Each structure stands twice: as C-alpha cells, then as structure tokens.
Amino acid sequence: MLVLGLAAGGRILRTPLSQLAVAQGRTADPARANLWRAGALVPALLAAALGAPLSAIAAAAAAGELAASLRALHLARPILVSRLALEAQP
C-alpha cells in the first residue's frame, strides 16, 4: 500500500509544475513529463504478465511518477530560476 501512496503522491506533487508550465504558455511541458509516466507501463505490464505481486506493479508506477516529476522539474527550471533571480534583486 505504501508504494501506491508514493505513486499517487508523486502525481499530486507534480501538479504545481504542470500548472506553472501552462500559465507560462509552455503547454507541451506537462505532456513531455507524462511520457516518462507512460513509459512505466512497460515494466508494469511485464511484472503483471510474469505474475509478480501487486507491489512490483505499484513500484513501476511509483518509478514512472518519480521520473515524470524529475522531468517536469527539469523543464520548469528556466522559469523557476528566472523567478528566483527576480526575487533576489534588492
């Protein structure tokens, strides 16, 4: 159950990054990040086909969410850095 919670939590934590991207007109960024999440379907399907326990399938989902979150953060970096630089000015 913990791994399912981690997967769901990862998706929720990525929401502000997606909203920031859309607000800045970078509407393709959330889709680019979600490609990593979709890529986690391959190991999840393999685990299911091999009869692995649900925790293995959930771990693949959590890994996909982590990869998508890291990609979203990487894509949002130019926006976040420019905002931080503006706020740091006296």
Image (cartoon, rainbow, N blue to C red):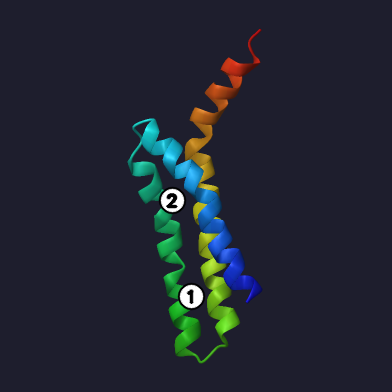
Which residue is tagged 2?
Answer: 33
The residue at the point 51 percent across, 63 percent down is 64
Question: Tag 2, which secondary structure?
Answer: helix
Residue 43's disc is 1
The residue at the point 52 percent across, 54 percent down is 12
Question: Tag 1, which secondary structure?
Answer: helix
Residue 2 vs 71, above or below: the answer is below
Q: Which amino acid does the dot numbered 1 rest on?
A: Pro
Residue 38 vs 79, above or below: the answer is below
Front in this rendered view, residue 83 or 48: 83
Residue 20's disc is none
Q: Which amino acid does the dot numbered 2 rest on?
A: Ala
Q: Quadrant of residue 45 in the image?
A: bottom left
| Residue 23, position as x, y percentages in the image | 38, 33
| Residue 7, position as x, y percentages in the image | 56, 65
Q: Nearer the viewer, mark 1 or mark 2?
A: 2
The residue at the point 60 percent across, 23 percent down is 84
Q: Quadrant of the N terminus?
A: bottom right
- Please tell me how crowded label 2 is: few (under 14), some (14-19), or many (20+) other residues with Cα within 10 Å: many
Residue 27 vs 40, above or below: the answer is above
Alpha carbon distance from label 1 to label 2 = 18 Å
Q: Quadrant of residue 18 in the image?
A: top left
- Please tell me how crowded label 1 is: few (under 14), some (14-19), or many (20+) other residues with Cα within 10 Å: some
Horizontal arrangement in the rendering, residue 59 relative to residue 34 (left or right): right
Horizontal arrangement in the rendering, residue 63 relative to residue 75 (left or right): right
Front in this rendered view, residue 25 or 38: 25
The residue at the point 51 percent across, 57 percent down is 11
